[in-house]
Image (cartoon, grey):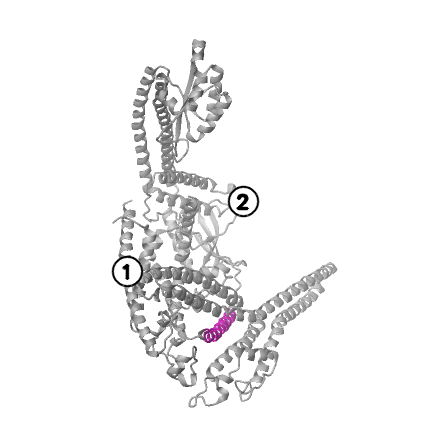
């Protein structure tokens, strides 16, 4: 059988690697990605393993690289991603790499430190510059009596009067010498600062402040935030107030700068500050240039380095899982390997040995094991999405039938039954077709938008869903809720003009107005305009839903047969598969055949084609009522001239089918446990017999021992049997009730398809019709606007939301109704040691944390 | 011309325009050949007709007018297409130069 139908055959292998060759061999296996290693020292903690040092060194390297990457991103330098995949470097190259990274990191740190110091310095100088400039204004005002400012600020004037009043100056003389401090503070702290000063000093200080217009860069934050600050100057008298003011300044994180009292000194100082700022600017520019050069050089290689380091780390991590041989000369590994790939793996091992220059070839030998091997389904880009849908429910048990290949067809089909509209299908088809055609460039973009990734990952599923929806839309004859009249309707109107004018609604008579053979494919377009369209469609869609459902479930049970055959479970075939299929066929498949009989046998009465009244649509019995009567053994009421039965002998056949069908239930319930019990008894008897002969030769103590053992053994077995009975009971109830509820569950195909068709019709009538029924010639412009609105709603509601809902219902039909018939899904998936996967996840996590 | 919409609006405009051109031209043709399926979209609902001829006249003129309206709308979508195409071009060029 092909590998698509079942998971790959796996085998446990033991791998002997020479110590020198181990690194190269594991590296080759990592490139190959077909081997899953098992941890041979699970009870040894991570710090006691052999290659702990190397792993730690790799971690350290990775940390340095991340630091570099962060710095590169901060400067907005593009990182070169050539997409090349360098091989894992030799272990001795690791030292070179380490040295390079160490050097780079140190250089960068030094540059950063210097830059920060310089920036701080620069900030201080700029602040000082501003202080000198602003305070100059204050002092000037003070000297000139500051008429202007007093005028402008009457409240200030009062303070000034109390503090520097003419009287006080005259009376105090020298004792009233005013001190002052000047500094810079964050602008938003000014109001609080002012109030605090006022309260703490009881209004005995005088504060002037001015805003610095240009924002200043704050070097203490990493990103170099821009902050607004204000210059202030505080006048006070006496040392006590001075200390108090200083304390308050400290509390508000204001920076104080020395400001000379004499104007000449201030001017001189300002000049000095200006020249120093200029010098600093050139130095800062050079530092930035240097940093940029270092980072640009690093950006060229950083992706490459990341790959190398991650590969080395993965190799040592894997080597840590291995066992050391007693002689310390060789490493022993255990791994799960697909049987078909043993050759390729051996080839890779040989390559690894050659590369390492070792002479002793590695040994790979298969081992016997009772453990369940992992499930490995080989996928390509097309089947991957479908396999993911299946695996989302549960990974298949080892070598179990894989539902994915059937899902490729049934999934889009059942979806399309619910989503049947040619126009919506076309939108889906075009979108997915674009994704499929532009696959490579789109995949290379590596978007981290989750929704986009879901769509892109499922592009082939969406593509098929679109194609199938176009087909079902064609069958339903729905294009944005309008019908296409491709072949011309097969109905005619034979009413007279007065009939048409006098009646609001008229019914077409299938006997006279129908051409007696159907529209070639799909629904006749005349139904689009009819009032009773939904009644007609409901009957049709409900029937096909049940027919598809029963066929789908039958198929599931038959897939189960292949499972039983493969695992050689004869008992399951006899006691589960056969009664299950009889139950389903005799009851539910019979019901679908009733539908076909009804479709074929009954038609509108017609003088030529269908003259018999018993086969006219008037006499057609309801399938549902027939089925209910059948299960309840009720004979249907006879309404002459009709025959309540569809064919002769129907009553007795139905009776037979129901009785056999019901008999299947105890068959499913008891046959398997009873047969198992008998088998065990037989074995037990044999065991007892052999015990007896054995015991004849052995002395009494042996007999005592065996007698002591037997009862406990029996108890265990009985308990086991009870469990089997319960399990079988649950299984049977689940199947029998499930057959009923699952059949009904397939009616969602009808319900959603009805909802979809109605919704699209409502959207057309509520929105598009408004644009079309404009009376004047200006309707074109209105139509232009309304079409855009309609298009957006169509995509948003009908394609996306309805599509999602139909998708989920399809998923449910597959997971529950189909897979419950055969699928265990208790396996665990094969996770090979592969550089590709490791690198992808590492990149994804690093991007997620950014 | 200056840049008015961002890349996403431009793309949205492009897609809707292309869709609009195709669908409205087709709908115009269907109206022009008096497709019965579209009779519900004619402005006939709130009118009463004394004679059948009157109805036919009204339906006929409705079909013709709707056909032209559809084509007018399609023509406007050609303009929209050119506009959003130009915007898209501007956006893609500016994103490349950065």
Q: x, y (%) of residue A248?
A: 48, 23
Q: x, y (%) of residue A838?
A: 42, 49
Give the camera-side residue of A75 and A266: A266
What is the crowding at mark 2: few (fewer than 14 residues within 10 Å), some, or many (at least 20)? few
Quarter of the picture holding the N terminus of chain A: bottom left
| Residue at position x 54%, y 58% in the image | A371
What is the crowding at mark 1: few (fewer than 14 residues within 10 Å), some, or many (at least 20)? many
> The residue marked by circle 1 belongs to what chain?
B
Query: Are callouts 2 and 1 both on one chain?
Result: no
Residue of label 2: A44
Q: x, y (%) of residue A264?
A: 32, 15
Is disc 2 placed on a helix, strand or loop? loop
Residue numbers of the magenta segment: A534-562
A8 to the left or right of A492: right
Q: Is residue A15 above or below residue A405?
A: above
Residue of label 1: B76
On the question of residue B92 being in view, the answer is yes
Question: Is residue A543 on the magenta stretch?
Answer: yes
Is disc 1 placed on a helix, strand or loop? helix
Give the camera-side residue of A778 and A130: A778
Q: x, y (%) of residue A43?
A: 55, 46
A807 to the left or right of A770: right
Question: Is residue A187 on the magenta stretch?
Answer: no
Q: Disc 2 vs disc 1: Cβ atoms closer than 8 Å?
A: no
Give the camera-side residue of A431 and A771: A771
Q: Mark 2 or mark 1, which is nearer to you?
A: 1
On the question of residue A410 being in view, the answer is no
């Amino acid at each position: 059988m092909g590998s698509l139908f079942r998971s790959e055959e796996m085998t446990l292998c033991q791998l002997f690697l020479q110590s020198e060759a181990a690194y190269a061999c594991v590296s080759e296996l990592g490139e190959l990605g077909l081997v899953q290693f098992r941890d041979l020292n699970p009870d040894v903690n991570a710090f006691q393993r052999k290659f702990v040092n190397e792993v730690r060194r790799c971690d350290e390297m990775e940390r340095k690289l991340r630091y570099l990457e962060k710095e590169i991103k901060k400067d907005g330098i593009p990182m070169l991603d050539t997409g090349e995949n360098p091989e894992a470097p030799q272990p001795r190259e690791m030292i070179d790499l380490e040295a390079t990274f160490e050097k780079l990191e140190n250089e960068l740190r030094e540059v950063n430190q210097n830059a920060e110091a310089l920036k701080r310095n620069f900030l201080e100088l700029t602040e000082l510059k501003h202080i000198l400039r602003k305070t100059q204004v204050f002092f000037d005002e003070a000297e000139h009596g500051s008429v202007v400012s007093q005028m402008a600020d009457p409240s200030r004037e009062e303070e000034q009067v109390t503090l520097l009043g003419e009287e006080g100056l005259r009376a105090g003389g020298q004792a009233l010498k005013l001190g002052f401090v000047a500094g810079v503070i964050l602008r938003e702290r000014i109001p609080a600062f002012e109030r605090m000063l006022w309260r703490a000093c009881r209004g005995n200080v005088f504060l002037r402040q001015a805003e610095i217009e240009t924002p200043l860069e704050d070097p203490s934050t990493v990103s170099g935030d821009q902050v607004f600050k204000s210059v202030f100057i505080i006048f006070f008298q006496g040392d006590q107030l001075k200390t108090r003011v200083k304390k308050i300044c400290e509390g508000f994180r204001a920076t104080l700068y020395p400001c000379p009292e004499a104007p000449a000194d201030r001017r001189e100082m300002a000049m000095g500050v200006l020249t120093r700022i200029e010098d600093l600017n050139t130095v800062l520019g050079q530092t930035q240039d240097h940093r940029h050069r270092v980072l640009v050089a690093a950006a060229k290689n950083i992706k490459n380095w990341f790959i190398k380091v991650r590969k080395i780390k993965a190799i040592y991590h894997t080597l840590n899982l291995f066992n050391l041989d007693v002689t310390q000369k060789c490493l022993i590994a255990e791994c799960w390997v697909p049987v078909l790939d043993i050759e390729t793996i051996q080839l890779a091992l040989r390559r690894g040995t050659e590369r390492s220059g070792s002479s002793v070839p590695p040994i790979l030998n298969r081992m016997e094991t009772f453990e369940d091997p992992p499930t490995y389904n080989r996928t390509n880009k097309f089947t991957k999405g479908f396999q993911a849908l299946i695996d989302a429910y549960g990974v298949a048990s080892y070598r179990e039938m894989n539902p994915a290949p059937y899902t490729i067809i049934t999934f889009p089909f059942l979806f399309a039954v619910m989503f049947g509209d040619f126009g919506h299908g076309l939108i889906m088809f075009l979108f997915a077709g674009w994704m499929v055609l532009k696959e490579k460039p789109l995949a290379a973009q590596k978007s981290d938008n989750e929704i986009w990734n879901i769509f892109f990952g499922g592009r082939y599923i969406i593509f098929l869903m679109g194609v199938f929806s176009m087909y079902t839309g064609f069958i339903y004859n729905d294009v944005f809720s309008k019908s296409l009249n491709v072949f011309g309707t097969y109905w005619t109107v034979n009413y007279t003009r007065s009939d048409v004018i006098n009646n609001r609604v008229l019914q077409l008579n299938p006997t006279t107005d129908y051409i007696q053979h159907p529209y070639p494919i799909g629904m006749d377009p005349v139904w689009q305009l009819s009032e009773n369209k939904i009644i007609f469609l409901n009957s049709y869609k409900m029937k096909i839903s049940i027919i598809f459902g029963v066929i789908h479930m039958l198929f599931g049970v038959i897939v189960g047969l292949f499972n039983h055959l493969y695992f050689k479970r004869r008992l399951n075939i006899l006691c589960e598969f056969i009664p299950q299929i009889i139950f389903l066929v005799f009851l539910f498949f019979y019901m679908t055949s009733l539908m076909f009989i009804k479709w074929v046998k009954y038609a509108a009465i017609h003088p030529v084609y269908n003259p018999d009244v018993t086969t006219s649509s008037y006499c057609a019995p309801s399938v549902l009522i027939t089925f209910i009567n059948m299960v309840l053994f009720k004979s249907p009421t006879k309404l002459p001239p009709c025959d309540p039965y569809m064919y002769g002998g129907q009553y007795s056949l139905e009776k037979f089918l129901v009785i056999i069908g019901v008999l299947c239930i105890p068959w499913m319930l008891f046959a398997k446990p009873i047969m198992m019990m008998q088998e065990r008894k037989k074995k037990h008897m044999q065991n007892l017999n052999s015990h007896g002969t054995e015991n004849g030769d052995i002395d009494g103590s042996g007999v005592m021992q065996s007698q002591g053992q037997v009862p406990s053994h029996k108890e265990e077995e009985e308990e086991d049997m009870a469990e089997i009975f319960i399990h079988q009971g649950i299984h049977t109830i689940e199947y029998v009730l499930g057959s009923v509820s699952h059949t009904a569950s397939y009616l969602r195909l009808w319900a959603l398809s009805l909802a979809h068709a109605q919704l699209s019709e409502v959207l057309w009538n509520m929105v598009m019709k408004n644009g079309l029924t404009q009376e004047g010639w200006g309707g074109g412009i209105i139509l232009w606007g309304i079409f855009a609105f309609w298009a957006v709603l169509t995509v948003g509601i009908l394609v996306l939301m309805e599509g999602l809902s139909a998708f989920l219902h399809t998923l449910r039909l597959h997971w529950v109704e189909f897979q419950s018939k055969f699928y265990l899904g208790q396996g665990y998936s094969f996770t090979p040691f592969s550089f590709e996967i490791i690198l992808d996840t590492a990149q994804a996590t690093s991007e997620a944390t950014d | 011309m200056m840049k008015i919409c961002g890349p996403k609006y431009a793309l949205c405009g492009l897609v809707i325009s292309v869709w609009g051109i195709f669908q409205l031209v087709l709908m115009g043709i269907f109206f022009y050949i008096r497709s019965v399926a579209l009779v519900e979209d004619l402005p006939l609902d709130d009118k009463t007709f004394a004679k059948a001829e009157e109805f036919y006249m009204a339906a006929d003129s409705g079909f013709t007018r709707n056909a032209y309206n559809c084509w007018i709308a399609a023509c406007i979508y050609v303009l929209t297409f050119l506009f959003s195409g130009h915007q898209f071009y501007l956006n893609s060029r500016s994103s490349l130069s950065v």
